[in-house]
Image (cartoon, coloured by chain):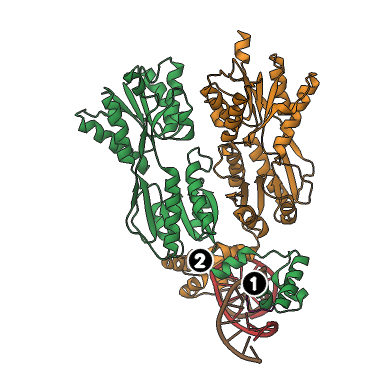
Chain colours: A green, B orange, C brown, D red
DNA sequence: CTGTTAGCGCATTCAT
DNA sequence: ATGAATGCGCTAACAG
């Protein structure tokens, strides 16, 4: 691979001159500029970005860390981030935090391989984030609060969203409302659980531990939880699933047992992933403003890069999307 | 940020010794190793990965270039690639080719920011690929054939898959079969179109240009094509959509007009995206072995990195997944 | 076993 | 307007 040195040699100028010419600096004459450009073309010269990054201590890229690149859930988020990143002339890279300690994500954080980082991955450790965040690499955290220098917080109102969902179920006349839980180390799950409990409480419904089922935020988990309810022969009047994937798992489990969701049991999810609209019955769920979240996250990164570190956490509102699985439409008839 | 030099100073050793110690080389005594590690810890030293990459001319990462990071379609592919990449101790980065000439993807290719590249993005130019591919950065191309040095080809049998789909439609008794087309510059689309025509031909059905509708591989495109058919008051007996997203768009358009898919019109898609199973009616479609594709692509990269450049293109088989939208299940009753 | 030194490829300061 | 020289942070060949 040709280096800038080769180009300079061929053009008969010094390396520095070649560099100036290549970067279109006004310091170099038109004539030599052309000479250098011609040489570069002839050698098929491509600048080595890594050398440049090292020299400038700047990568011009934003890293988006996700717990799983193949999730169904991030599509809109990515779009939002992408829009802003491109608009700022930066590059965007998506990184998986899969693999724990040795994941690409951890390496990126530790080695400052991006000028800014957006994280939506609960398996990235708080301490790592704190020690990685720096003035020239601010970090935006999307899935938990963390007060630290150069760390910005944006969150969805999980608790409020869950509250809305359960309140809706209660208004529909249900009292025995199960909670289908995500992982206990997930902050999102905790908040949703809190919202669930608060809604029960506010309606004078006593909470029972029996009502919570573990579904691990996966479709399979939801399916198994549904099966478990069937085996125990305990079908609640309503189920609030802490995310849509689990809710879809429940739908499948109940479908196999000929239990009609939206009639025999009411079901509400959380997230409003793309699938939720298409599943049968269409899933009532709590929508997160994912694209907006992506946009704001990216904007915060660039603001921080410009020295404006907003201190206060941003809380985004959710919206209850009523479809068929909760039975509300039936009730109205 | 502390550098290795600071660590060496604090530990009272030379930079090289510090480097060896940090990299756990057997050349350095246990005692000094500990001294260095202690110093590193005290300074919260983090190696600068970019400097290392420059020095070693190696990034230890594989880049996966996709035309749109937020597509519903890549989930399984990414999983396959990820598995192999992690197994080889490499990092994986997903990059969007959105943004044309200035996209991150183009930069990655030109500046050799990865040790291997996998491309599924029709908007990356052949010439760019040819000039970017090199011994220490092989490129695997997933969406078109391209014979060039250090370029490897893996493809799905688009033509065969389309043939199967249309053959199935013909076997069901349909003659007027519309083709819902993707972009004309897409190789995949071309091949699927070829399979469609061949199937017609082999059954003695004359092809008519009137039967092809443009849908641009998007749901919106499919929706509009469906609307157009309705406006023209020309509903074909069957539709073969060149991908599932367009097929889903057609379903929506027809649903609005109370035309029953699977009864009034038969519909088959291509890809078998996750949604296809859940949409109503469930979509009959041609499944691509996406995960397998990812696995093989990554394997090819690592083989190439080890000097084994397989020359022959790999062709992966497709499978017709019969669900409800084609009406086959009805017919059997 | 440890230290000295030379680059990796580039941008940039300082002379000229 | 151009060139010589320096260093970003790191690894590794070489010397001791």
Q: Residue at x 65, y 35 (%)?
A: B292
- Asked whether, in this view, residue D9 is left or right of residue A328, the answer is right
> Foreground: B115 or B98?
B98
Q: Position of residue A255 (x, y in %)?
A: 45, 18
User: Magenta part of the protein: which range?
Assistant: A25-29
SS at mark 1 in the image: loop
Could you say which quadrant of the image residue B168 lies in?
top right
Chain label for disc 2:
B
Give above or below for A93 relative to A179: below
Q: Is residue B150 magenta?
A: no
The quarter of the image holding the C terminus of chain B is: top right
Q: Residue at x 47, y 45 (%)?
A: A77
| Residue that label 1 marks | A24
- Marks 2 and 1 on same chain: no
Whole-angstrom CA distance, mark 2 to mark 1, is 47 Å
Specify whether residue A115 is in view: yes
Could you say which quadrant of the image residue B57 lies in?
bottom right
Chain label for disc 1:
A
Could you say which quadrant of the image residue A168 lies in?
top left
| Marks 2,1: beta carbons within 8 A | no
Q: Position of residue A294 (x, y in %)?
A: 45, 48
Specify whether residue A128 is in view: no
Rendered image: mark on residue B33: 2
């Amino acid at each position: 691979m040709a280096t800038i040195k080769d180009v300079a040699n061929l053009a008969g100028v010094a390396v520095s001159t070649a560099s100036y010419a290549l970067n279109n600096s006004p310091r170099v004459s038109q004539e030599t500029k052309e000479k250098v450009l011609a040489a570069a073309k002839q050698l098929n010269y491509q600048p080595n970005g890594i050398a440049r990054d090292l020299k400038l201590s700047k990568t011009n890229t934003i890293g988006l860390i996700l717990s799983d690149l193949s999730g169904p859930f991030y599509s809109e988020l990515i779009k939002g981030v992408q829009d802003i990143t491109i608009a700022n002339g930066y590059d965007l890279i998506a990184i998986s935090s899969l693999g724990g300690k040795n994941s690409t994500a951890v390496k990126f954080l530790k080695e400052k391989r991006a000028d800014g980082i957006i994280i939506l991955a609960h398996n990235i450790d708080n301490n790592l984030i704190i020690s990685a965040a720096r003035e020239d690499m601010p970090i935006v955290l999307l899935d938990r609060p963390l007060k630290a220098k150069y760390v910005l917080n944006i969150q969805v109102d999980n608790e409020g969203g869950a509250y809305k969902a359960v309140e809706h179920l209660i208004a529909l006349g249900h009292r025995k409302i199960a909670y289908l839980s995500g992982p206990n180390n997930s902050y999102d799950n905790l908040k949703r659980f809190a919202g669930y409990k608060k809604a029960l409480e506010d309606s004078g419904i006593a909470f029972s531990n029996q009502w919570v089922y573990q579904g691990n935020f996966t479709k399979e988990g939801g399916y198994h939880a549904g099966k478990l309810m069937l085996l125990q022969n305990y079908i609640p009047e309503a189920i609030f699933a802490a995310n849509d994937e689990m809710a879809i798992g429940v739908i499948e489990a109940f479908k196999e047992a000929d239990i009609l969701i939206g009639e025999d049991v009411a079901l509400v999810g959380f997230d409003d992933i793309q699938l939720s609209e298409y599943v049968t019955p269409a899933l009532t769920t709590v929508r997160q403003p994912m694209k907006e979240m992506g946009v704001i996250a990216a904007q915060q990164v660039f603001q921080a890069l410009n020295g404006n570190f907003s201190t206060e956490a941003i809380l985004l509102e959710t919206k209850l999307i009523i479809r068929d699985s909760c039975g509300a439409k039936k009730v109205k008839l």
